[in-house]
């Protein structure tokens, strides 16, 4: 199968997940770029940020149109992660490939476990600025270092720490992802290695189109079914990456 076809398929799958779940799909971008498309770990995390930024911004527009974005709350949460995302992005290019891959596999596994937990309705909570800032900073650091959007962390934080409803948290997480990814991408300018735009461009285009379809898919299939299916795939990917590091 040609590289172009693989890029289109991978991009479509990641876009579908991101659009349907409001986050989490981008965590598959890095392993797809490494194992399917031959990118180095450093180049893959940088390329992933490009893909995540464009796709999240597109999905954000769709959610905002439906009134599912808490702009003020999301902006404050995202701003807390800008500096950590920038600093982590600058450091990531100098980290050994095996360490970067291993760290990514661990985060992917944790994301899958988090998705497999039963969803619980969270009552509105009093916003604690220090806790919200800490959660935002931690999310920014993960985004910058590993090149993932971090929606699997942002959504529960927005629900549990800031008291947003699930649907609004999913939309607002896309604002946080977009801002953090842009900050990390700025830090990585000129350090991403061979980015191979002939692969990144179709990958990104397919992901953007997939995000629109994912938004529609979310209205037809229960969120729990989508989330559990994706979590199982993510666990398998994390296991393969860890096996690769250990071998």
Image (spheres, grey):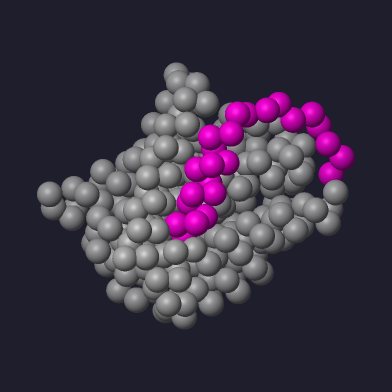
Quarter in which the C terminus is drawn = bottom left
Q: Nearer the viewer, residue 200 or 44?
A: 44
Please determine whether, in this image, residue 28 is positioned above or below residue 45.
Answer: above
- Could you tell me residue 83's position as x and y percent? 66, 69
- Could you tell me residue 188's position as x and y percent? 48, 74
Q: Is residue 67 visible?
A: no
Please determine whether, in this image, residue 208 is positioned above or below residue 222.
Answer: below
Image point 53% across, 35% down: which residue?
116
- Could you tell me residue 126's position as x and y percent? 87, 40
Q: Nearer the viewer, residue 142 or 117?
A: 117
Please determine whether, in this image, residue 56 is positioned above or below residue 137.
Answer: above
Left or right: where 125 falls relative to 14: right
Q: Find the magenta span and give its range.
A: 104-127
- Could you tell me residue 138's position as x and y percent? 66, 60
Q: Is residue 11 visible?
A: yes
Image point 37% across, 45% down: which residue?
236
Please determine whether, in this image, residue 220 is positioned above or below residue 45.
Answer: above
Q: Quadrant of residue 84?
A: bottom right
Residue lying at the far left of the rendered structure: 1
Left or right: where 182 falls relative to 3: right
Q: Would you say residue 118 sits in the magenta stretch?
A: yes
Left or right: where 235 falls relative to 39: right
Q: Nearer the viewer, residue 191 or 240?
A: 240
Image point 63% across, 47% down: which residue?
154
Q: Nearer the viewer, residue 62 or 138?
A: 138
């Amino acid at each position: 199968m040609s590289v172009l076809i693989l890029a289109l398929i991978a991009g479509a799958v990641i876009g579908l997940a991101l659009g349907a779940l409001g986050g989490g799909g981008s965590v598959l971008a890095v392993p797809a770029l490494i194992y399917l498309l031959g990118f180095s770990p450093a180049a893959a995390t940088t390329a992933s940020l490009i893909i995540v930024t464009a796709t999240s911004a597109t999905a954000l527009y769709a959610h905002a149109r439906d009134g599912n974005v808490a702009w003020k709350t999301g902006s404050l949460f995202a701003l807390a992660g800008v500096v950590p995302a920038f600093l982590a992005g600058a450091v990531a290019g100098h980290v050994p490939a095996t360490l970067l891959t291993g760290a990514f596999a661990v985060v992917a596994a944790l994301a899958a476990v988090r998705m497999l937990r039963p969803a619980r309705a969270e009552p509105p909570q009093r916003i604690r600025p220090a806790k919200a800032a800490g959660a935002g900073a931690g999310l920014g650091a993960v985004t910058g270092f590993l090149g993932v959007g971090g929606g699997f962390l942002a959504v529960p934080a927005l629900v549990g720490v800031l008291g947003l409803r699930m649907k609004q948290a999913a939309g607002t997480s896309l604002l946080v992802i977009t801002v953090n990814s842009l900050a990390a991408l700025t830090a990585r300018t000129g350090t991403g290695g061979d980015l191979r735009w002939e692969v990144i461009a179709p990958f990104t285009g397919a992901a953007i189109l997939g995000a629109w379809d994912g938004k529609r898919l979310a209205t037809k299939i229960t969120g729990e079914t989508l989330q559990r299916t994706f979590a199982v795939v993510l666990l398998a990917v994390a296991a393969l990456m860890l096996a690769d590091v250990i071998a």
